[in-house]
Image (cartoon, grey):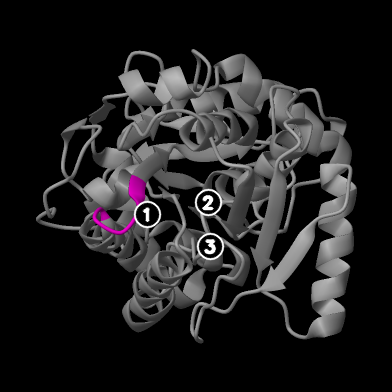
Amino acid sequence: MTDHVIITGADGCVGTALMKLLKEHDVRTTAMVHAADQADLDARAAKLSEIAGGPVECQRIELTEEVTIEDAAGATVVHGAGITNFKVREERAQQVNVEGARKVFDAAAAAGVRRVVALGSLYASGLEPGLVAEGPLPEAAQYANHYERSKWQIEQDFVGYADRFETTMLRPATVFTDDDSGTVSFANAVHHSLALAYIGLLPILPADPMTPLYLVTADQTAKAIWAAISGPNFGWANVSPNAEGAITIKELVDAAFIAYETDADFKRRRTPQPLFADMDTFNTFADAMGPLADPLVAGALRSLRPFAPQMHVTKDIENTVGVQLAGGHAGVSPGDVEQMCHYVLEHGFPTKKPRQS
């Protein structure tokens, strides 16, 4: 057990959920966040203190610069900072995600921390079908984008620090909502796609409708991180449903449209559900639209390409440890999707992108 937790990327969707949980357990918390200047840092500290329900120590971190972790002997570091955009360029993914993680791990070792909990990604498995084990992953033959490849490389580097501090790698599924209420304060690729479908800019979806979609809440992920901080070192864990407990892409779309049909504006537009297509058909369609397409439609189609190959790959997730850490449950149901969509119909789709991956 540690009495001091340092979180990189603390103002992301998972980071803020973890901050609240740590305050409930009366754990000293240091938030390391990206900030343009001191005024920006002060503003972020004030916001995090409001979220956490008490004062929060806040320090600036830039993964492209030297990273220093101070007053951290015996502490636990939770590393969640990094770029989560699937469209990230290779050079940028390497510079920020891979080299930035090394800087954090080096700084943690120099500071004498007890344990580092690194937040990875299920998609570090790349485009490989089959089981994603709760353990080290082999290099995939192909990755859908440079983000995925960077997350795999971070894992490879991380195991090299096992003789300098305790290493725990958690791979959360995609965070869909803040909690079980359906509240959502950060946008990711799933929310973006659902927003495009709502306004009628997603005529075709490059996906196998029966592909499992692995989603969790920020609260479930935060509970798993807290268990990884406060309990014995489990080493590796996937915080995710398995294939049997996951919803399919078709179930996601169906649930969203059930909620949308309660909206008068949506019903008046008579927007149809997107058509499912294989990658060749999608690429042919997107290329043919080209300059003839409405700029918004063309942009919507382009936005899907960096992740689209994953929506045709059937994976299963080993999650024995991850579900245990999350308190016995990790995942969302079609009913949760409907609840989230009702929330955004009332409050609007979130525009703020998460910092954590």
Indicate whether 208 appears above or below 328: below
Label 3 near label 1: C-beta < 8 Å? no
Label 2 – label 3 distance at C-alpha: 18 Å
Q: Label 3: which residue?
A: 81
| Badge 1: residue crowd in 10 Å (few <14, some 14–19, many ≥20) | some
Please name the residue shown 73% across and 27% down the image.
182
Question: Which one is in front, 348 or 293?
Answer: 348
Is 346 one of the magenta-colored residues?
no
Task: Decide: is 311 above or below 96.
Answer: above
Q: Quadrant for residue 33, please give it.
A: bottom right
Image mark for residue 189: 2
For the residues carrying marks 1 and 3, which lies nearer the camera in this image? 3
Give the mark toward the camera: 2 or 3. 3
Q: Residue 260: in sight, yes or no?
A: no
Give the magenta range.
162-167
Please name the residue that numbered disc 1 is placed on: 307
Q: CA distance from mark 1 to mark 3?
A: 21 Å
Q: Secondary structure at mark 1?
A: loop
Contact (Cβ within 8 Å) of mark 1 with mark 2: yes
Q: Give how far across and how far down residue 131 sits, in percent.
A: 18, 29
C-alpha separation, residue under disc 1 versus residue under disc 2: 8 Å
Above or below 3: residue 93:
below
Q: Earlier in the sequence, mark 2 or mark 3?
A: 3
